[in-house]
Image: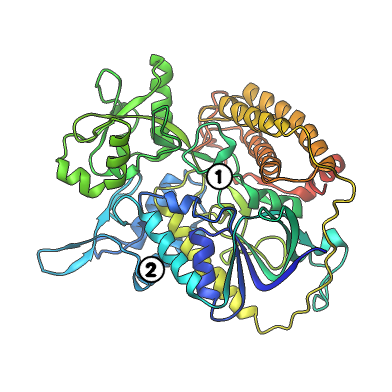
Amino acid sequence: MTNTYKHDALIIGGGAAGLSLALRLADSCSIAILNKPSNPTGNTYFAQGGISSVMREKDTFASHINDTLIAGAQLCDLEAVTFTVEHGPENIRWLQDLGVPFNTEIFTSGKRELHLTREGGHSQRRVVHAADATGKALSMTLENHAREHSNITFYENHIAIDLITSAKLDTKPAQNNNDTNTCLGAYIFNNKTRHVEIFQSRYIILATGGASKVYLYTTNPDGSTGDGIAMAWRAGCRVSNMEFNQFHPTCLYHPEAKSFLISEAVRGEGGKLLLPDGQPFMHKFHPMAELAPRDIVARAIDHEMKRLGAPCVYLDISHRSTAFIASHFPTIYQRCLDYGIDMTKEPVPVVPAAHYTCGGVNTDLHGCTDIANLYAIGETACTGLHGANRMASNSLLECLVFAQSAAQHIQADLHHPYCYPYLPAWDESRVTDSDEEVVVSHNWDELRRFMWDYVGIVRTDKRLERAMHRASLLEHEIDDYYSNFRISPDLIELRNLRLVAELIIRSAMQRKESRGLHFSLDYPLADKDSAAKNTILNPARLSTDEKIKIIK
């Protein structure tokens, strides 16, 4: 007997986007929030820097918009940027009302206001933060409120497998009088019972984060496997700009420091990047030096490391006082001390690492996708805000603004009647338990290594061709395994990662220029002959053979 759960809204993912949407909807309907683990391990929780927003009189919306457009390398959607920036202050005030413990300072006038820091690409101090652990403070506050609300139910250790749509079932809800493909729910793997369950819902929201785990070295936690992007693609949604993978310039370089980020705010407060011999180098690459956009800083570090054969470069803020460093960066300071590095006295070894997925599922300003009743918000979505390169601390802002907008869109539709259609149970009648789990781990490792080697910070046509060949070989192995054995969390994530890897490679192969985060040695300049264009992949336009792949 398959367990079936019914809620008005099913939110897949419990980060800033999912939690803030849940809180804004909770007084209007019943909500299910699905989390992979039982403890917070998403990108929001580990975010250090903060949330960008215009909060001072000397700053302006126009300035924030302009900074974002410049960082995005002429590929941002102006309407999306304006919409996001103009809704920033009200979302910060909403978080303050919820009790997020942002840092404040007392001005000479005696008035206490939010302390604002500055990060790469910003012309003003406009980053609201809670020391250097903003994500943790944000996550804990939102989750505490959500768990107290009677209309919100958390389902821990649940992993989404695939979306259920009317097109897949060749059916449609009773109230749907046209042929619109509609999302009806999802098949979910309960990792406690090891069974597949059905979650039916009027509205399904993908808030699963990005896909940086597709790379060997990443600042992201293990769950960043592109689940929402992969599920939306298999369901028939377009995805855009998947070639723009942001590599954070400064990940701690230490054999025991897994995925630990050294916040951009360290450079914002005066930290200098140095070569192994102690010489600065960023001034040779950009007028803003250490405060240049992330893609430029990451490529500069990558260039210098390859030129010198160096395993890392160094980030030095030891010229600031111990009290300043300990108060502004307590988490980073303590973690470095744990690894024997005293950042008040010596530079910190750093390397670039995959950090953020700028592309994703196509959405409008309400988070709506190509499929009715299916929304995508946060890093899963491609809203047009980031263009070819996300500006620092615009990500959490995007989560909040589009969660607010999606909630308003859903609330406006709630008065319509809804009848839950019949959904078939998950069929496991022709599969067996696997006796070769090593296949999954080997494929996982191979995928992440060739993506790092061939589809990393610097690309070539030859590298991309090699990557696509390996992705195709892995597809056959993974599909065969998926068809014959019972699923597991690792298999679900591997299947999604391989698909996302293919989407990244396809997108990169289509862009015959260098722009933002996509840099090709074969096309080192941006295309000056035409306006910048998005790379849009549409599953409906694939060949027949390719369509068969995505509906398996």
Q: State whether residue 34 appears in this view.
A: yes
Image position of 108 (left or right of 302): left
The residue tagged 2 is 95
Q: Secondary structure at mark 2?
A: helix
- Which residue lies at the image location 40% right of the left edge and 60% below the top edge? 138
Q: Which corner quadrant of the image does residue 260 belong to? A: top left
Of 451 and 43, nearer the camera is 43
Cα–Cα span, label 2 and label 1: 38 Å
Residue 211 is labelled as none
Q: Are marks 2 and 1 in contact (CB under 8 Å)?
A: no
Q: Which corner quadrant of the image does residue 285 belong to? A: top left
x and y percent of residue 256 in the render? 42, 30
Image position of 41 (left or right of 155): left
- Which residue lies at the image location 47% right of the left edge and 59% below the top edge? 398
Q: State whether residue 65 appears in this view.
A: no
Q: Say if 174 sits above or below 199 in the image.
A: below
Q: What is the three-letter code of the residue carrying label 1? A: Ala
x and y percent of residue 519 in the render? 52, 31
x and y percent of residue 125 in the render? 27, 54
Q: What is the three-letter code of the residue carrying label 2? A: Leu
Q: Secondary structure at mark 1?
A: loop
x and y percent of residue 496 in the render? 68, 44
The residue tagged 1 is 531
